[in-house]
Amino acid sequence: MASYKDILRYYRGYWPIATLSIAAASLFEILDLLVPYAIGQILNVLSRQPLDGPVQRIVVSIGELFNIPVGQSLALWVLLGAIFAVSVLRAPIQPWIGSWFHWAIPLRARRDYAERVLSKILTFPLAFYDENNPGRIAGRVSRGLENHTWTYPEVAGQFVPKLARVLGIFGVILLIEWRIAIAFLLSFIVILGFSLRNLQSLIRREEIIDRYIENTESRTSEIITNIKTVKAFATEASELERQRQRFKREQDVILHRIHRGYVNLATWQRTVVQTSVFCVLAMTLIAAVQGRISIGHFITTLTVSSMAYAEIEPLSMVAEFVARRYAAMVRFHELIQEPSDIYNVDLSIIGETPPYQFTGKVDFRNISFGYDTDKPVLKDVSFLVEPYQTVALVGRSGSGKSTLVKLLFRYFDPTAGQILMDDQDIRSLDMTQYRKRLAIVHQEVDVFNGTLLDNLTYGNSQASFEQVQDACRIARVDEFIPSLANGYSTVVGERGVRLSGGQRQRLGIARALLVEPDVLVFDEATSSLDYESEREIQMAMRSLFGTRSLLVIAHRLSTVRDADKIVVLDQGMVAEVGRHEELLQNRGLYWQLNQLHEAGEILD
Ligand SMILES: Nc1ncnc2c1ncn2[C@@H]1O[C@H](COP(=O)(O)OP(=O)(O)OP(=O)(O)O)[C@@H](O)[C@H]1O
């Protein structure tokens, strides 16, 4: 569970400079008090009342030092000089010690944490993404970073220095008349104590609403991701209605439970502040009338105390902002504290030549696995992929084909059994380096926003242009390049040319080939492709047979017919293994699937 300590740690790299700049800003706020104090003393000089002892001593010392007669005029010059020093001389220094660091620190911390949170996102286990969609994760990250960045300047540049100023004012009033100082201090303790108690309960409400907003954002992100389905089912109106209800509920809670709370707090604060100002005025007036304080002190006390009460509003505004943002900041740290993948992903390796080189012999030995411990998905699965063999995985939907591939990539580890790559348990290998020797072509190939060339070399930025051309020839990407306006430099993806399903698949194959994997996994696209594209891909794929070990999640008879080995899975178990003709002769599950799907040429 994250807490305020994590929020403080966010700025941890900058503590020394933060402490210095906050201390300097606080000092400036206290020095500001010299102005009303000096004006009070000037009034005393003009009304021929005595100066305060320490001021008198300073005037005398200066008179002696410069050999100037001590009198009214020297006292006025000294006081005027003090006002000049703390107001005019300070002006060009303050922004560089204050504002500069109050923004430089959170902006630097933002860069640190943007990097840290991305490293974290890159190393979350796959299961995390099943439970949290991109909208939820992105929302939490951006709200967290933004709120940390905005909160620091307010707390460091406003809250702490203003609080220091209030303490300074207490000191000044204490010098003048202790009874007024005590009344002043008590009123502040009451106001701050009550405000803090109220803010705590408002923070709890903010935490609840933050989770609620996150769920709403997550649904909006799902609508965007699944927009084709939304449009196809014409559910735009019902989606809007559902979200509209959530927006309304959000607004009701924010307006009536949270915002009302803040306004109630402000109302109460304002009333207490005005009462206190009045009491201090009355007490000061009585003290002046009774001759306990001079006219100058009367003016100083009234000026500084109203300065202090005027700070209540900015102070409580900052406290309110912090309270409003607290939940989002804490939830950002909760995200960072989520456990990473159990396998150590090495984020320091960029474009290095992987140390491993395998023949491509993969031995699945007695593999059992379940996403939930009580629901086994794979049960005692064993089969061997010899180097350069093409092995097809066949079975009904849900039989565990994709799960086997996830285990090969070590997204999960089997609960029993082992996967051996060239007779080495893959758990004993460096995971990042091991994965670099594998490649996969998914059913839906991801295209990043960038040029075609960027997308082709995504897994191997060192590839030469000749290698790219070779891969494109094998994967038949070269057949559609002439139709693109700028050839390899054509921008594809989000902001560029949309590639068709078949083109994307061929891009996926070329991209996989460019990393020169020892084992290539191919998750055949099912029925999203037209006949022409499908044939192109079939031909591209067939030209890979025998060039390396191939593991194909096969949906088409044509692939399966040519495979060296077909592994038929049934409810997580190996039902049959053999070549196409052998399995047909067996008249088992493969034969049944074959019969069922022969007409459509698709196996599951
Ligand atoms: N992330 C997951 N969490 C929990 N259960 C899962 C997860 N992924 C898959 N499953 C379950 O595991 C079983 C096997 O799924 P898998 O995707 O491996 O099957 P498949 O043979 O590849 O199916 P298809 O051909 O339809 O893609 C299914 O019952 C599925 O519901």
Image (cartoon, helix red, strand yellow):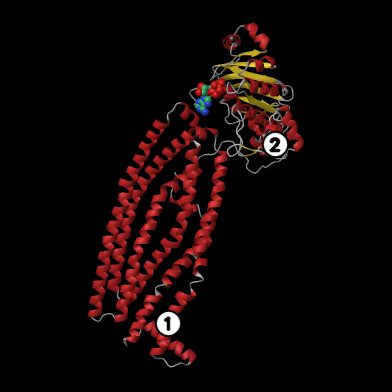
- The image quadrant of residue 43 is bottom left
Rendered location of residue 28, percent (x, y): 45, 70
Image quarter of the C terminus: top right
Q: Label 2: state its secondary structure.
A: helix
Graded by Cα atoms within 10 Å as few (under 14), some (14 to 19) or many (20 or more), the crowding at tag 1 reads some
Q: Amino acid at mark 1?
A: Leu
361 relative position to 237: left or right: right
Which one is in front, 80 or 129?
80
Residue depicted at 36% across the width and 72% down the height: 171
Instruction: Give coordinates of residue 13: x percent, y percent.
Output: 54, 55
| Quadrant location of the N terminus in the rendered image | top left
Q: Label 1: state its secondary structure.
A: helix
The residue at which mark 2 appears reads as 487
Q: Nearer the viewer, residue 463 or 60?
A: 463
Mark 1 or 2: in front is 2
Q: Is residue 263 left or right of residue 457?
A: left
